[in-house]
Amino acid sequence: MKTAVSMGTGNDTRVTEFVLIGFTLNPHLQTTVFALFLLIYLLSLFGNLVIIALTLLDYRFHTPMYFFLSNLAFLDIWFISSTVPKMLVNLVTKNKTISFIGCILQMYFYLAMGSMEFFMVAIMSVDRYVAICQPLRYNIIMNRRSCVLMMLGCWIGGFLDFILPTFMVFQLSFCGPNAVNHFFCDNSALVRLACSATQKLELMFFSIASLVILSTLLLTIISYAYIVVTILRIPSASGRKKAFSTCASHFTVVTIVFGSCIFIYVRPAESSSLDLTKGVALLNSVITPFLNPFIYTLRNKKVMDVLKKIMSKGSPVES
C-alpha cells in the first residue's frame, strides 16, 4: 500500500494526497466487514428515505414533529454518505488515498452535518417540551413559519460553524507524513500531520465543537427537565406512560448522539486510545444515522400502521 504521495516546486515539498489508515483488520475479515457496512449503508438510506416519503406523501404526517424528523432523515443520508462510501472503497481496494481537497471537504461536511444533528436534536427536544408542557398552545407556538425558521437556523448554523477553521486547515503546510490514523479525514488526526503550528487551530476546533455540543445539550436537558416534572404531575399511570412513550424514541437518539460526541470532542484526544476514539466516531457517523429511522418508526404505531397499509394497498396517501 502506498504510504506517502507528495510533490513540490523547488525545495518546497507539499502533500497532495492523504492515506486513510482506517481500522486494523485481519485481511480475511475485510470482505465480511465490507458486506456488513454496505448492508448498514443501504438500510440507512432505505429507512431515512421511507421517513421522508411518508412525511411528504401522507397528510397524517404533516405535523411539526414529522417535519423535524424528515429533516433529520435527510441530514442522516448525507451524514452517513460523507464517510461510508469512501470507507467501503478502502476496504476492497489497495489504494486507500484521498486527495488533499477531498480530505478537507470530507472533514468539513462531517463537522458541519454533525453540528446540524445537534441543532436538530435540540429543536426536537423543544418540540416535545411544547407538546407535553404547553399542549393547548402547541399549534400556536409550533406553527409552520416557526418550524421552517428553526430548521433553516439548523442548516445555516451547521454550515457556518466550521467554515473559518476549515479555511485555516487549507492554509496549513503539510510536508509529510501523510497517513491519517482514522477511517475518514477527522480534523484532529489531520491537523496532527501539519508541519506548521496548529495550537490555535486545535483550540478553535475544540471551542466550536464544545460550544455546539454543550449549548444544545443544555437546551435538551432543560426541555427534558420540564417534561419529566410535567409528566410526574399527571395523576393517572396510563397518562404518564403515554406521555413517556412519546419521548422515548427521541430520548434514545439524544443519548446516542450526545454521548458519543461528548466523548470525541469534549475529552482531550490524548486521554483516550485511538481505536476507542475511532469506534465512538463510527457509532456517531455510521450507526446513529442507521438507527435513527428504525428507532423512530419501530416504536411508532402510526408509522407502522401506515407502512402495513402501503404494503397491502400500495399507496400511503390519505385525503
Image (spheres, rainbow, N blue to C red):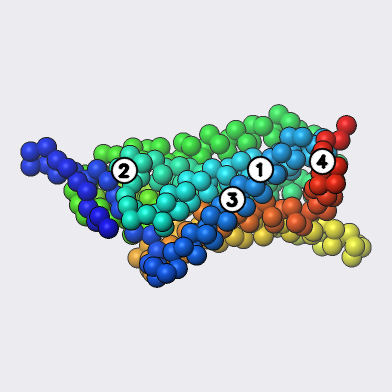
Decide: few, some or many residues near mark 1? Use Cα within 10 Å; few <14, some 14-19, many ≥20: some
Dot label at residue 49: 1
Element at badge 4? loop
Q: CA distance from mark 4 to mark 1?
A: 16 Å
Sequence-first tag of 2 and 3: 3
Dot label at residue 153: none
Residue 162's x, y, as percent? Answer: 42, 41
Q: CA distance from mark 4 to mark 2?
A: 45 Å
Q: Is residue 88 above or below residue 272?
A: above
- In-front residue for pair 302/261: 302
Q: Is residue 149 above or below residue 233?
A: above
Dot label at residue 99: 2
From the image, tell me which residue sits under label 4. Answer: 314
Q: Which amino acid type is shown beneath numbered disc 2?
A: Ser
From the image, tell me which residue sits under label 3. Answer: 42
Sequence-first tag of 4 and 2: 2
Residue 185's x, y, as percent? Answer: 37, 50
Q: CA distance from mark 2 to mark 3?
A: 26 Å
